[in-house]
Image (cartoon, rainbow, N blue to C red):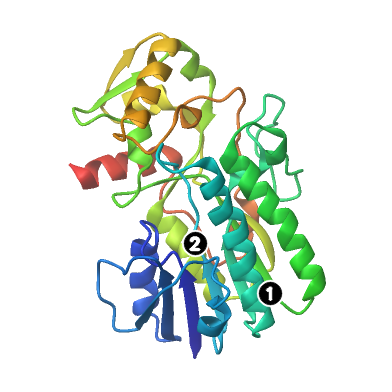
Amino acid sequence: MTRVAITGCSSRFAQVLLPLLEEDPEVKQIVGIDLTPPTTTYRKVQFHQCDVRSPELGKLLMGCDTLVHLAFVVTRPYALPLAEAASINLAGTWNACRAAAEVGVRKLVVSSSIAAYGILPDNVDFLTEESQLRGLYTDFYYSQHKHANEIWLDGLQLAFPALMITRLRPCIVMGPHQAGLGLLASADRTHFTSPESYQTRLQFVHEDDLASAFHVSIRHDLSGAYNVVGDGAESLPVIARSIGLQVVEVPREMLMAEAERLWKAGLSNAGPEWLWSEGSLICSNARLKATGYWQPRYSTVESCAATLAALA
């Protein structure tokens, strides 16, 4: 029987993963770690209020077989300084993973991101797990942090060669619990876009498919990195139109200015950097499929359609 620790246990995504672990007879207990308790009560979850940067974290991880590290600042509110986000994302990840290794946790399942590859204009389609990580060579904090963490995990693996480390690299996550829909539609089912947006194709993964990837990584030993993306790729305005949204084109400068205004006013957690990139990032999910444990139920477009339908 498995005792699983989860950092960021009160996050949006944890709300999707925890029910799977709650119903899994192989999971005996869940050690939930976060600064705020989960909004739902689970019989297997033993909650601990703790910062992932705390030197006391290792005590909570003793006796656990697996650590699932989800605690990460993704979209950054304007009120949260970038230095604080970096401290959580970098120092928090390093502290949690090293503490787990030092107290004898057998396996780490770490939430990385395809952003670690870097969103760059010379990216080829369908990057694989063997493709070079170049997130540090971009101006996007999220790519920088995910790439830096993967470099650090390389060092941790050398220091603890018996440690099983699974790195799951999802794309943008859709689903009724996630914030991704904010990129797609406003409250009145309108998608505001710019003419340039048609040139950038994206991938999405549904929260249920991502939760399944984490679940199989807990149940099975999958060493190394795995891209977790839905099949297919398309631009946001094309997706929006295909699922019945009204698409309104405005100049790029106007779109970015409004995004920045909402962000600075505290009405959005996603800064302008989340709305525009100078390159593409399309990844292959063949390696995870080849394990025989995972197949996405939703394609990129279907993820968006299912999210819209669930929230309607």
Q: Nearer the viewer, residue 270 or 204?
A: 270
Q: Amino acid at mark 2?
A: Leu
Residue 83, image x, y percentages: 56, 45
Image point 31% across, 52% down: which residue?
177
Tell me if I can see residue 284 in this picture: no
**Quadrant in which the C terminus appears:** top left
Look at label 1 and name its amino acid. Met
Residue that label 1 marks: 164
Who's the residue at 76% across and 49% down the image?
Answer: 130
> 188 or 67, which is in the foreground?
67
In the displayed structure, 219 sits above or below 78; it is: below
Tell me the residue that label 2 is attached to: 70
Residue 163 in view, yes or no: yes
> In the image, residue 181 lies at what x, y percent?
33, 38
**Image position of 35 (left or right of 134):** left
Nearest to the eye among marks 2 and 1: give it: 2
Q: Position of residue 152 (x, y in %)?
A: 73, 59
Q: Earlier in the sequence, mark 2 or mark 1?
A: 2
Residue farthest top in this picture:
251
Q: Nearer the viewer, residue 170 or 283?
A: 170
Marks 2 and 1 sit apart, C-alpha to C-alpha, by 17 Å
Which corner quadrant of the image does residue 246 belong to? top left
- Dot 1 crowding, Cα within 10 Å, few <14, some 14–19, many 20+: some
What residue sits 45% from the left and 64% below the top?
A: 212
Can you give x and y, in whole percent of width and height, for residue 148 in the image?
Answer: 69, 50
Give the crowd class for mark 2: few <14, some 14-19, many >=20 residues within 10 Å.
many
Work out whether 190 lies above or below 311.
above
Residue 182 versus residue 58 in the image, above or below: above
Assign a secondary structure to mark 2. loop
Regarding mark 1 in the picture, which secondary structure is present there? strand
Please name whichever residue, 295 or 19, is drawn nearer the observer in this view of the structure.
19
